[in-house]
Amino acid sequence: DIQMTQSPSSLSASVGDRVTITCRASQSVANYLSWYQHKPGQAPKLLIYAASTLQSGVPSRFSGSGSGTEFTLTISSVQPEDFATYFCQQSYTTLSLTFGGGTKVEIK
Amino acid sequence: QVQLQESGAGLVKPSETLSLTCTVSGVSITRDYWSWIRQPPGKGLEWIGYIYHSGSTNYNPSLKSRVTISVDTSKNQFSLKLTSVTAADAAVYYCARMTVAGTFSLFDYWGRGALVTVSS
């Protein structure tokens, strides 16, 4: 299995801050990397796929970058509705899809 | 709009079989792939497997011997069975649609999750 490691596991931020989350793969996944947002009691929401393609309807303050083994999700100016858990997922091997452990973004 | 809703027993005894159903609305299940994913308490997400409407499946190798995913196109539902459960199988179970954009597989719609506890 390809292991996905996210850092940090949690962070505190103020509204308006720039937030960056990192996801590292144990081997190259090219750009087969997606990012999701998950709020308690809600269905997870797809934000970005193909490492940097914004899903339809997702605000432009979200962006993704990276390829190979290192990826980042950036929120350029975090808003109150963005406080949630974010996780990455690789689809390089569709026979064994794997997720990162998640990063919880909390209000400072 | 597309909605997915998990249903099934929330309490399962050790060694018994966990059974969950996902009801899909807003889109026909006769396209795309349909998946189960779980999240044990305090842990990350684990992909369980997916099924195509034709019935072809792909399972997580670590669970393959105990998992069956099936589809009922007449009801627009798909189901999960996990046999011989232990405490390690306690989790929130999510159903999700996996679609393919070009060569990229992504989960674009999810249910809210169903909590399954394993206890005698």
Image (tube, grey):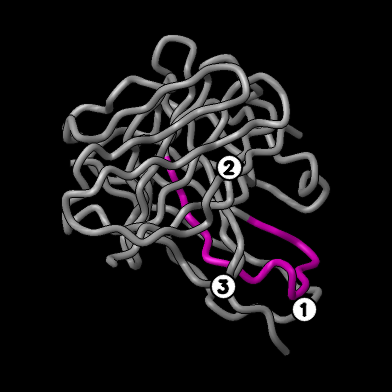
> Which mark is in front, 2 or 1?
2
Q: Is residue B109 left or right of residue B65?
A: left
Res. A108 image quadrant: bottom left
**Disc sitting over residue B116 in the figure:** 3
| Residue that carries the numbered disc 1 in the rendered image | B14
Q: Are marks 1 and 3 on the same chain?
A: yes
Q: Does A74 lie within the magenta span? A: no
- x%, y% of residue A80? 17, 58
Q: Which amino acid does the dot numbered 2 rest on?
A: Phe
Q: Which amino acid does the dot numbered 3 rest on?
A: Val
Q: Are marks 2 and 1 on the same chain?
A: no
Question: Count the marks: how many?
Answer: 3
Q: Is residue A92 left or right of residue A40?
A: right
Relative vertical location of residue A33 with respect to residue B24 in this rendering, above or below: above
> Alpha carbon of mark 3 to alpha carbon of mark 2: how far?
20 Å
| Residue that carries the numbered disc 2 in the rendered image | A99
What residue is shown at x 53% (from left), y 74% (from top)? B9
Q: Residues within 10 Å of mark 3 (few under 14, many from 20)?
A: many
- x%, y% of residue A99? 58, 42
Residue extent of the magenta highlight: B81-96
What residue is shown at x 77% (from left), y 78% (from top)? B14
> Alpha carbon of mark 2 to alpha carbon of mark 1: how far?
27 Å
> Alpha carbon of mark 1 to alpha carbon of mark 3: how far?
12 Å
Give the secondary structure at mark 3. Answer: strand
- x%, y% of residue B93? 53, 60
Relative vertical location of residue B45 with respect to residue A106 in this rendering, above or below: above
Q: Chain of mark 2?
A: A
Q: Chain of mark 1?
A: B
